[in-house]
């Protein structure tokens, strides 16, 4: 029953939580750098079209199934199945989503840990600055050594790739994620998303305005806003934009389905989903106004952002080399900006990671009698162990796990969700779900277009991406 499950207390609470899940490292870094290397404005246009025409309908499939079943993905797909065999397959699809969500979290936690590392290192350096000034006033003779031991060494350790550092930071990030999830829907997910999301939007906007005043920024802005059609016809543009939109809205693993299951029956689902999509896309576009100009400011300051062949350096190199180099070139202001930026990345990662952990946690709670707190710790520690294995075998496993989960599993599972919503769920029962407290749903544009769309167009496009990526 819905009554003893958690529920979002308000419309805004849900929108912030679901948008928090959608907005993550993918939007703030992935989208802008992909835009930069795929023709700038041309990528932006294709991404916008695909986000609303493919990702939004697929998101709606998950939200509607989720709210109808008020259960985790496995049980939800079982519930809407007409025959025992379709139900068994549904259960398996939900379970596969759970595994994929856990694996996505296991690499996401590693990258997010690096964000924490850069955040703490910036904070330490700020502290070092204040400490130096203080010691200077006191005319202390041990000042340089003291600052070196207390600030410089730990900061370098935090910023340098090593197994112990990666494990420590990943564990820290997992503990934060677990801490929020143990508090449940209302007190944990909703409360934190409410606090963190507005902070995130304000920080990106503030940073973007600042960066736009720096020399070189306008070149970045031009790349972002003036389409380069010679690059736009590149064969990868469409696939990349599709993948970006799909990953960005957290689709295919049951994350949005489980969030949908916590929405109250009073809400108008099509507009809720629309808000989430608009927020997600809006933040990605906003982040573009920060990242692209920042890259060209870095270029202006002598930082390499293109390889000899004119290709943009790879995404991870960019974020962990270019941005710190940019911040360094800006003196004390840069230190403050760096602190805010990496805090912001950590925040964005956290509102996404909680949505990933909620998938296996909800499944376990709903299938056993174990409490939320115990379940969260056990599942969280298990995922941290997988992360540790990836860290220890970084060169072989890291890229592999990302490819298998995001490039292959997500589109395939997303395809299955559309098949369940479009073909295997009875149309009248689907309509009933939409009509809850909104009797006019049958006459709305959404019901005229969406059922056929999710049945045919979405699966075809997703299959197309999957086929291409092979
Ligand atoms: N959408 C998030 C981002 O852009 C990541 C994310 C959260 C995700 N939950 C997910 C991705 C579930 C895939 C599946 O960073």
Image: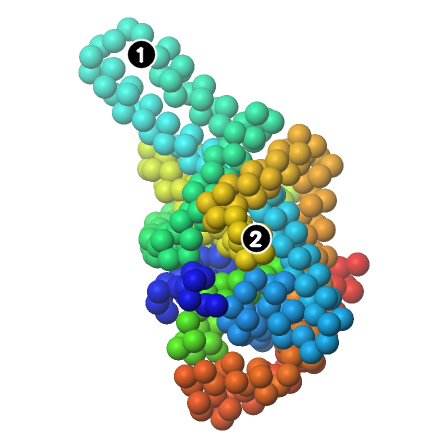
State the residue at coordinates (47%, 85%). Answer: 435
Q: Is residue 14 above or below residue 269?
A: above
- The quadrant in which residue 179 appears is top left
Q: Is residue 301 left or right of residue 255?
A: left
Q: Nearer the viewer, mark 2 or mark 1?
A: 2
Queried on whether the Cβ of the residue with tag 2 lies below 8 angstroms from ligand 1, the answer reads no
Image location of residue 357, percent across then percent down: 53, 50
User: Which residue position holds label 1?
Assistant: 143
Q: Residue 308 lies in what quarter of the image?
A: top right
Residue at the far top in the pictured view: 141
Q: Residue at the spot x=48%, y=24% of the render?
A: 156
> Foreground: 308 or 169?
169
The residue indicated by pointer 2 is 368
* Mark 1: secondary structure: helix
| Horizontal relation, residue 337 to residue 109: left or right | left
Is the C terminus in the top left, top right, bottom left or bottom right quadrant? bottom right
Q: Badge 2, how many Cα within 10 Å: few under 14, some, many 20+?
A: few
Q: Residues within 10 Å of mark 1 (few under 14, many from 20)?
A: some
- Image x and y of residue 234, in percent: 70, 63
Residue 319 visible in the current orientation: no
Residue 348 as seen in the image, left or right of residue 455? left
Which type of secondary structure does the marked residue at label 2 adopt?
loop
């Amino acid at each position: 029953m819905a009554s003893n499950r958690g529920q979002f207390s308000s419309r805004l609470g849900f929108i912030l939580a679901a948008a928090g899940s959608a907005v993550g490292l993918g939007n703030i870094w992935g989208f802008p750098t992909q835009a930069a290397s795929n023709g700038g404005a041309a990528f932006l246009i294709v991404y916008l079209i695909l986000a609303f025409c493919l990702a939004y309908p697929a998101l709606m499939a998950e939200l509607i199934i989720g709210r109808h079943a008020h259960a985790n993905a496995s049980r939800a797909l079982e519930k809407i199945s007409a025959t025992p065999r379709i139900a068994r397959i549904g259960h398996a699809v939900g379970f596969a989503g759970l595994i994929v969500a856990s694996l996505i979290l296991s690499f996401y936690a590693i990258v997010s840990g690096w964000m924490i590392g850069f955040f703490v290192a910036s904070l330490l350096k700020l502290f070092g600055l204040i400490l130096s000034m203080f010691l200077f006033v006191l005319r202390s003779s041990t000042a340089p050594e003291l600052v070196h031991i207390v600030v410089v060494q730990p900061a370098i350790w935090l910023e340098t790739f090593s197994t112990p550092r990666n494990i420590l930071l990943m564990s820290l990030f997992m503990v934060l994620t677990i801490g929020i999830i143990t508090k449940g829907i209302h007190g944990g997910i909703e409360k934190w998303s409410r606090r963190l999301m507005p902070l995130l939007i304000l920080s990106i906007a503030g940073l973007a305005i600042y960066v736009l005043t720096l020399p070189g920024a306008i070149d970045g802005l031009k790349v972002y806003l003036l389409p380069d059609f010679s690059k736009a016809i590149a064969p990868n543009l469409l696939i990349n934009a599709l993948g970006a939109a799909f990953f960005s809205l957290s689709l295919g693993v049951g994350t949005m389905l489980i969030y949908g299951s916590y929405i109250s029956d009073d809400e108008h689902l099509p507009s809720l989903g629309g808000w989430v999509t608009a927020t997600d896309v809006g933040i990605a576009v906003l982040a573009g106004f920060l990242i692209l100009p920042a890259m060209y400011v870095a270029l202006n300051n002598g930082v390499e952002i293109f390889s000899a062949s004119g290709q943009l350096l790879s995404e991870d190199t960019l974020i962990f080399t270019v941005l710190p180099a940019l911040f360094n070139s800006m003196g004390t202001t840069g230190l403050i900006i760096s602190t805010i930026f990496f805090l912001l990345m950590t925040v964005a990662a956290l509102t996404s990671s909680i949505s990933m952990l909620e998938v296996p946690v909800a499944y376990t709670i709903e299938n056993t009698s174990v409490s939320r707190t115990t379940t969260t710790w056990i599942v969280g520690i298990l995922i941290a162990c997988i992360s540790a294995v990836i860290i220890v075998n970084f060169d072989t496993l890291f890229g592999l796990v990302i490819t298998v989960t995001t490039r292959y599993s997500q589109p395939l599972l997303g395809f299955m969700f559309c098949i369940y919503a479009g073909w295997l769920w009875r149309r009248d029962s689907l309509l009933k779900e939409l009509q809850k407290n909104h009797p006019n749903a049958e006459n709305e544009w959404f019901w005229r277009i969406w059922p056929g769309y999710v049945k045919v167009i979405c699966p075809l496009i997703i299959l197309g991406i999957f086929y291409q990526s092979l």
